[in-house]
Image (cartoon, rainbow, N blue to C red):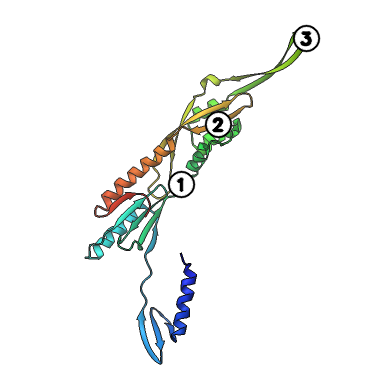
Amino acid sequence: MIPVETLRLAQETAVKAAGVEVREIPGDPETLIVAQDGRYDTRKVPPARIAHEVFSLEDLINYGRRCDEATEDVTPRSVWHTSEQVVLILDDADRRDRVTFRFATTKAFDRLKALEAADSGWCNQQNFVRMLKIEFGVNAAIVATFRTLDFKRGDASHADLQHGRETLGKSVESAVQGLADIPEELVISLPIYRSVEEQAVYHVRCAVEINSIQGLFKLTPLPLELDAALQSHQDDIHSRLVAGLPDAGVFFGAP
């Protein structure tokens, strides 16, 4: 594909070679003066392509309705949506004029998404409690069960003496007071998005892992839990678009 700058340079070169001069009119950005061979002509500048960005799905729907009311022509429109954005194509014939609504995720969701990674790290008791309380807003009673855990460790040496060989070993004994009260799973309730009108709360089941020897904790979303939450939101978006723009095609995906 030829770069845009190369095409623009070729066009400017061709204009100069033909002896054509294009001038702007001060105070009138919609009109240009074209001079060639001592003759002058005026040309209307076509309006820029529509590339609006709105901050809510309702605004995107309202813009689509406004376009329907402003024109008598039947223009084929379509709406495409993913977990990142919704794009309204105002004319499927050229697919250039569009209105976009981009989703902005919450810090809590981004944190949970990072914990889903296989290489996500373990954290100590203090940081784990802080994460549950401040980042995820977990119930205070549940947080307290993790805060009151008491790790006790001790070393025990043993000797194994046999004919012809001698071995010495050392084992680590670890006990955690209050471990019986710790759940194997936690349900983290959080909004996925912070965008206008998109703060619905979703529930994500997470596994709780404890390394009692090192006193470390790990929280991991169970398989497909985050995907299910995202899909639930996408289903809701789809329904709202179909209801709000009944004359437009609504599709999962990007244009």
Q: Amino acid at mark 2?
A: Lys
Disc 2 crowd, CA 10 A, few/some/many (<14, 14-19, 20+) = some
Residue drawn at x 77%, y 11% is: 165
From the viewer's perspective, tell me whether residue 175 is left or right of residue 87. Answer: right
Residue 247 locus on image (x, y percent) = 24, 55
* Secondary element type, mark 3: loop
Marks 3/2: CA–CA distance = 46 Å
* Secondary element type, mark 2: strand
Residue 205 is tagged as: none
> Is 160 rendered above or below residue 253?
above
Residue 182 locus on image (x, y percent) = 52, 23
* Secondary element type, mark 1: loop
Residue indicated by mark 3: 164
Q: Are marks 2 and 1 in contact (CB under 8 Å)?
A: no
Residue drawn at x 33%, y 63% is: 94
Q: Are marks 3 and 2 in contact (CB under 8 Å)?
A: no
Residue 203 visible (yes or no): yes
> Is 222 rendered above or below residue 34?
above
Q: Amino acid at mark 3?
A: Gly
From the viewer's perspective, tell me whether residue 57 is left or right of residue 114. Answer: left
Marks 3 and 2: which is nearer the front? 3
The C terminus sits in image quarter: bottom left
Residue 218 is tagged as: 2
Residue drawn at x 59%, y 19% is: 177
Residue indicated by mark 1: 105
Instruction: Return the disc, 2 or 1, that comes first in the chain's sequence.
Output: 1
Q: Amino acid at mark 1?
A: Thr
Instruction: Return the disc, 3 or 1, that comes first in the chain's sequence.
Output: 1
The quadrant where residue 37 appears: bottom left
Disc 3 crowd, CA 10 A, few/some/many (<14, 14-19, 20+) = few
Instruction: Return the disc, 3 or 2, that comes first in the chain's sequence.
Output: 3
The quadrant where residue 61 appears: bottom left
